[in-house]
Each structure stands twice: as structure tokens, then as C-alpha cells.
């Protein structure tokens, strides 16, 4: 069979209705909902400075899309923000899936984005997509597995409720005390101030945490976030941001910052004592950039949940690669840091397009 004559090009806003329709194969059958998520993720992103993806057209109809979430990072060796592309949403019309469009769109992205962005950081690799990314030259950076804290009875409750259809009900208790607050919205300016103080002590790449970015990042139209704050008087000392699973029973640590480590550890103990989630999880890729004793808090590396998840999805990696189609050894060095070494990253799942 002769390969169709596909037209590959950067995404343009007038193609959004067609892309949203195509994304029903990846996101949902609700095209209007897809447009809202797309607008938040790609068009409202304050880090954005160019087209957010690549499309493939056949006879004027969109049959393929690859989205790239733009994330901003800071590093001691750079005075300007470092913008990194996170490849994520890749969708091809079922009638066109035998022609290698995913890889072809990825190659065009390398050529098109190379002048603006130094790196790709893939945070949402799947078993089917991993061979294609490896073919494009991506290298594993760290495991995407989780350390998790839970009681056995809570794990059983979580597993039983995992696939239930009724609308979930959150157990989170919002409110404010003298030195502690729980909200559903970011206190962005206060968070940015604490993050700036902590960031001065971290020598590697870390997510850029500004009030503008916080306001945008945690406004996803289909996600639920919970913010825990520790205060000394009226001054914020530290915070923890959780992204909740769709059934609201599992919390993922998307970001956490404090001035002296003590505030975050105290917050985590308090969160665990409240039993508002069946499971609390942190990406293993985030562990190396903290001094927190996760085991003393009850987080397990090799418990039953980890074994179940390995059986279900395997042990998939974060992936990294220079954006340029042709690159040499120097392309891996950003702000004087070897980006192939996870120890040079302060990775937090707030940069992942899975949340």
C-alpha cells in the first residue's frame, strides 16, 4: 500500500477544533471539554512562546497531533529562565496509525523547536510509546515509580474503590488554624516568596516557581489540587501541593518547598495523620533532591502497591534528549549541568502533564 501524502506542520490556532476532535481518541469524547483542557494547557501557558505542537493533515483533515508542554526552569548557572519541552499528548487517527506519523511528527518538532528550546523532558512515557522515543534518541533519566505511604486497610479500600463509577467524594477537610491551613487554591504570591528563598540554595535545575506560573499551573479544568501551608505567625514557612487521583483517594506530591526542611516534614506528618487520602505518593525521581527521611514518615519503596503497579505498567522511565535533530555531547550540558544525571535536577511532578 502506498503511503499517503501527509502534510506535517506546526500547530496553528485555527486547527484547534479539528485537534480537539482528534483528541477524543486520547482524552475524552467531549470535544468542548477537550478544547477547554487544550486552551489551559497550551494556549494559556505563560511559558509559551511558539506553537505548542505538530499536526499531520491528510487532504486538509487533521489526522495526527503531538503536543509539547512548555515548562520553565531556573539554574544557578543561568540568569534567564530555561524553557524545556515535555512531549506528551500524541494522537493519530486510527485509519493512519500504520505510517509512523508519531515518529515523523517528533522529528519535525526537533527541527522546528531547536532554536528556542534546549531539551525535551518526557514525563509520560508509556509501554507502547517507549520504543519510538528511544528510536528518536531519548535516554532514560530516572524511574517514574513511586514511594508511597499507606496502611494496609487503606490500600484495600483504595483497590476496591479504584474502578467504581459513582461520583467520588473527597475526605479533605479545608480550613485554617494558627500555624496551618488547607485550601483548594494556591496562595501563589506567598508560595513564590518561599520558593525563591529555598531556590537560592539549590545548584541544579529546578522548576521556576513564580506567582504567575502557580496561578496558571493549578487551574487545570479537570484536576483537583490540595494546598497545605505551614506558618510562623503570618509568614509562610513551607507548603505541600497534592494532586488527587480521579477517585480523590490518592494524593501525589506535585511540589513542596520550605526554608529549612522542618516545615515540609511537619506538614507531611500532619497530612498523614489526617488520613484524608488512602495513599500518599511521591515520584522516586524527586527523592534525590531532598534531605527528607521518607522512610521515617512511612513511605515504602517495595510494598504491595509498588509490586501491583510494576505488574500493571512496568517500570517506565523519565526520558531526556536535546531538542536539535543533530546534536553532540555539548548539547546535553545546560547551564553547566549534565542533564543526563538526575542529581542535577530538582524534579517535581508539577512539571508533568499527567497532572
Image (cartoon, rainbow, N blue to C red):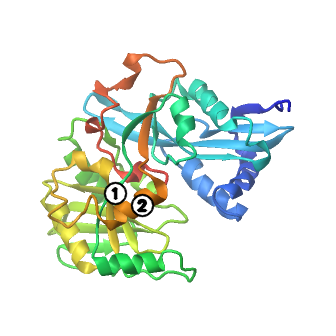
- Where does residue 113 sit, x and y in percent of width and height? 56, 28
- Using the image as rendered, state which of residue 316 and residue 103 is in the foreground: 316
**2 or 1: tag closer to the N-terminus:** 1
Q: Measured from the top left, where is residue 282 in percent x and y?
A: 31, 58
Q: Residues within 10 Å of mark 2 (few under 14, many from 20)?
A: few
Q: Which mark is residue 183?
A: none
Q: Is residue 53 visible?
A: yes
Residue occupying the point 33% across, 81% down: 173
Identify whether 288 is placed above or below 6.
below
Q: Quadrant of residue 257?
A: bottom left
Q: Judging from the image, what secondary structure is the residue with disc 1 in?
A: strand
Residue 182: give x, y in percent of width and height. 30, 74
Circle 2 is placed at which residue position?
309
Q: Which residue is mark 1?
A: 146
Q: Secondary structure at mark 2?
A: helix
Find out whether the residues at labels 2 and 1 contact each other: C-beta distance under 8 Å.
yes
Residue at (72%, 61%) from the top-left corner? 31
* Foreground residue among 276 and 104: 104
- The reply to whether residue 49 is visible in this rendering is no
Percent across and percent down for residue 189 are 32, 57
Label 2 vs label 1: CA separation?
9 Å
Residue at (16% x, 67% y) in the render: 266
Amino acid at each position: 500500500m502506498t503511503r499517503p501524502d501527509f502534510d506535517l506542520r506546526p500547530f496553528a490556532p485555527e486547527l484547534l477544533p479539528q485537534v480537539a476532535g482528534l483528541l477524543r481518541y486520547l482524552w475524552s469524547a467531549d470535544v468542548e471539554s477537550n478544547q477547554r483542557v487544550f486552551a489551559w494547557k497550551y494556549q494559556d501557558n505563560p511559558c509559551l512562546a511558539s506553537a505548542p505542537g505538530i499536526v499531520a493533515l491528510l487532504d486538509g483533515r487533521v489526522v495526527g497531533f503531538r503536543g509539547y508542554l512548555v515548562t520553565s526552569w531556573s539554574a544557578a548557572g543561568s540568569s534567564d529562565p530555561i524553557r524545556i519541552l515535555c512531549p506528551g499528548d500524541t494522537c493519530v487517527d486510527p485509519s493512519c496509525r500504520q505510517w509512523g506519523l508519531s515518529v515523523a511528527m517528533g522529528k519535525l518538532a526537533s527541527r522546528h523547536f531547536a532554536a528556542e528550546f534546549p531539551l525535551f523532558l518526557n514525563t509520560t512515557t508509556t509501554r507502547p510509546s517507549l520504543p519510538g522515543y528511544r528510536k528518536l534518541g531519548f535516554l532514560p533519566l530516572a524511574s517514574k515509580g513511586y514511594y508511597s505511604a499507606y496502611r494496609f486497610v487503606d490500600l484495600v479500600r483504595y483497590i476496591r474503590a479504584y474502578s467504581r463509577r459513582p461520583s467520588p467524594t473527597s475526605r479533605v477537610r479545608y480550613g485554617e488554624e494558627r500555624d496551618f491551613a488547607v485550601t483548594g487554591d494556591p496562595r501563589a504570591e506567598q508560595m513564590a516568596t518561599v520558593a525563591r528563598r529555598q531556590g537560592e540554595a539549590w545548584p541544579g535545575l529546578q522548576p521556576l516557581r513564580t506567582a504567575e506560573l502557580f496561578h496558571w499551573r493549578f487551574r487545570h479544568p479537570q484536576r483537583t489540587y490540595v494546598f497545605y501551608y505551614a506558618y510562623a505567625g503570618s509568614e509562610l514557612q513551607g507548603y505541600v501541593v497534592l494532586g488527587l487521583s480521579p477517585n480523590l483517594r490518592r494524593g501525589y506530591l506535585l511540589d513542596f518547598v520550605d526554608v529549612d526542611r522542618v516545615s515540609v516534614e511537619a506538614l507531611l506528618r500532619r497530612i498523614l495523620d489526617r488520613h484524608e487520602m488512602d495513599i500518599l505518593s511521591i515520584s522516586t525521581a524527586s527523592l534525590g533532591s531532598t534531605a527528607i527521611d521518607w522512610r521515617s514518615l512511612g513511605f515504602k519503596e517495595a510494598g504491595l502497591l509498588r509490586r501491583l503497579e510494576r505488574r500493571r505498567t512496568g517500570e517506565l522511565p523519565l526520558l531526556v534528549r536535546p531538542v536539535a535533530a543533530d546534536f553532540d555531547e555539548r548539547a546535553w550540558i545546560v547551564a553547566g549541568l549534565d542533564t543526563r544525571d538526575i542529581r542535577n535536577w530538582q524534579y517535581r511532578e508539577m512539571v508533568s502533564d499527567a497532572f
